[in-house]
């Protein structure tokens, strides 16, 4: 039912929502092996612009892409910490978890931080800020759009520059 999902994505975009989605955990190139929901139709066109797809990075600067993380030069926008992330689990406990489902909330948190300080920015401007403020690394160049890992501090700095120009 991909059309229903795409309709929901289009509706969210029309309402000014920035969608942030996990890339998946199969170590697949999702440019070639489609994982739904995808932001690309059969012709390879983006369904919406206000979506960020997130891969998982590690703490290891020598092996930055998490071994499980999906990737794609066209389909994965950014990477974010997604390995050995402390998370809540049932019964009031914490556990280190791995996955792009750990990385995408990190990116959503960066978006929320930027948007909370600069509420007049649009979803596309927040996306642009996140995409243009990554820490680039050659390991990620050929496996993601930006070739980098999200950086909250740089995102806020870039948002301030963008916001100041809008005034």
Image (cartoon, rainbow, N blue to C red):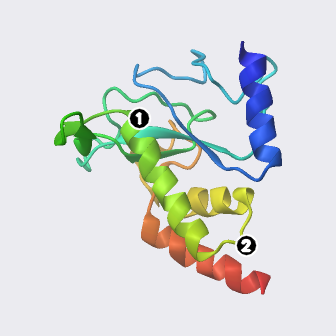
20 or 149, which lies in front? 20
Kindly indicate the quadrant of the structure image that contains residue 119.
Answer: bottom right
157 or 101, which lies in front? 101
Label number found at residue 36: none
Q: Position of residue 139 (x, y in %)?
A: 40, 43
Image quarter hosting the N terminus: top right
Determine whether 40 is above or below 134 in the image. Answer: above
Image quarter hosting the C terminus: bottom right
Asked whether, in this view, residue 112 is left or right of residue 70, the answer is: right
58 or 9, which lies in front? 9
Number of other residues with Cα within 10 Å of mark 2, as a class: few under 14, some 14 to 19, many 20 or more: few
Give the number of marks. Answer: 2
- Badge 1 marks a residue whose secondary structure is helix
Q: Position of residue 147 (x, y in %)?
A: 50, 48
Number of other residues with Cα within 10 Å of mark 1, as a class: few under 14, some 14 to 19, many 20 or more: many
Whether the residues at callouts 1 and 2 have beta carbons within 8 Å, the answer is: no
Q: Nearer the viewer, mark 1 or mark 2?
A: 2
Residue at 55% x, 31% y: name it: 72
Asked whether, in this view, residue 147 is left or right of residue 85, the answer is: right
Compute the Cα span from label 1 to label 2: 29 Å
The answer to whether any part of residue 48 appears in the image is no
Give the mark nearest the N terminus, 1 or 2.
Answer: 1
The answer to whether any part of residue 39 appears in the image is yes
Determine whether 91 is above or below 70 in the image. Answer: below
Asked whether, in this view, residue 71 is left or right of residue 40, the answer is: left
- Badge 2 marks a residue whose secondary structure is loop
Q: Position of residue 15 (x, y in %)?
A: 79, 49
Q: Position of residue 19 (x, y in %)?
A: 63, 44
Residue at 73% x, 72% y: name it: 120
Kindly indicate the quadrant of the structure image that contains residue 132.
Answer: bottom right
- Residue at image mark 1: 100
- Residue at image mark 2: 120
């Amino acid at each position: 039912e991909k059309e229903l999902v795409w309709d929901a994505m289009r509706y969210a975009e029309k309402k000014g929502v920035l969608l942030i989605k996990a890339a998946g955990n199969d170590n697949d190139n999702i440019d070639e092996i489609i994982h739904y929901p995808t932001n690309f139709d059969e012709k390879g066109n983006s369904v919406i612009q206000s979506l960020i797809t997130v891969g998982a990075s590690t703490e290891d600067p020598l092996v930055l892409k998490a071994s499980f993380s999906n990737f794609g030069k066209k389909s994965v926008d950014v990477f974010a910490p997604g390995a050995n992330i402390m998370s809540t689990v049932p019964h009031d406990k914490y556990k280190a978890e791995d996955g792009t489902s750990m990385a995408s909330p990190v990116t959503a948190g960066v978006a929320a931080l930027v948007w909370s300080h600069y509420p007049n920015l649009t979803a596309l401007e927040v996306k642009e800020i996140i995409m243009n403020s990554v820490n680039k690394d050659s390991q990620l160049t050929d496996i993601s759009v930006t070739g980098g890992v999200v950086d909250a501090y740089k995102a806020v700095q870039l948002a301030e520059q963008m916001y100041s120009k809008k005034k």
